[in-house]
Image: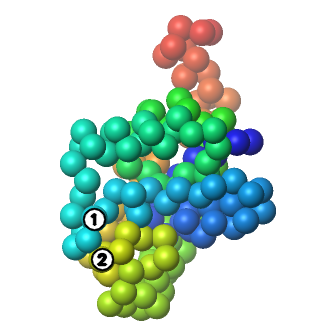
Amino acid sequence: MRRVLVIGSGGAGKSTFATRLGAATGLPVVHLDACYWRPGWDPTPQEEWTRAVDEITTRDAWIMDGNYGGTLDRRLAACDTVIFLDLPRVVCLQRVLWRALRYRGRSRPDMAPGCPERLTWEFVQWIWEYPRRRRPGILRSTRDVERFLRGVGAA
C-alpha cells in the first residue's frame, strides 16, 4: 500500500481518515481540496488541474483524499489501494453541519487558505443525492458481479 485513494461523500470523513492513515503509515497525505481551491473558493482551471493531478499521481507514494470526478480515472489508474467511505448520508450531513459551525469564518486545516468554511444548499443536496447519483458503481451482490462481467465480455 503506497498509493492510496480515499473517496466518499462530503462529510464522510475522507480528510480525517487520510490524515490518520498518513500518521499510521508515514505516507504523505494530499488533500485535493487544498490543491484544487484558490483563495475565495476560486477553482483551478481544468487543464491546470489535470496537470497538477498527473504530477501528484506520478509521485512514489501518497494518500490522496477527494472525489473530483473529472480526474478520478487518472487517480484510479495510478493508485494501488482505494478506500471508499460509504457512510449514511444523515451521518455525513451531521458532520458537515458540525464542521460548518466549528470552522465558521475560517479555513479548515485540510482546505486551501482563503477558503473559509461554508455550507451551501447545493452541497447539502450533493451529499443527500450522493448514494443515488454520485456513488461509484459498487458491486454489492453476485448479480451485480455477473452483470458487470457480461458488460465487459468476460463471462
Residue 116, quarter of the rendered image: bottom left
Q: Nearer the viewer, residue 146 or 11?
A: 11
Q: Residues within 10 Å of mark 2 (few under 14, many from 20)?
A: some
Give the amino acid type for the residue marked by disc 2 in the picture: Gly
Q: Nearer the viewer, residue 4 or 92?
A: 4
Give the amino acid type for the residue marked by disc 1 in the picture: Arg
Query: Circle 2 sits on which residue?
Result: 114
Say which mark, if any, is on residue 19.
none
Residue 143, quarter of the rendered image: top right
Residue at position x 63%, y 55% in the image: 28
* Residues at marks 1 and 2, CA–CA distance in whole angstroms: 7 Å
Q: Position of residue 40 (x, y in %)?
A: 22, 73
Residue at position x 27%, y 43% in the image: 48
* Count of residue discs: 2
In what quadrant of the picture does the N terminus appear? top right
Left or right relative to 91: residue 74? left
99 up-or-down from 113: above or below: below
100 up-or-down from 50: above or below: below
Residue 78, quarter of the rendered image: top right
Q: Position of residue 3 (x, y in %)?
A: 64, 42
Residue at position x 33%, y 39% in the image: 50
Secondary structure of the residue carrying tag 1 is: strand
Query: Circle 1 sits on which residue?
Result: 38
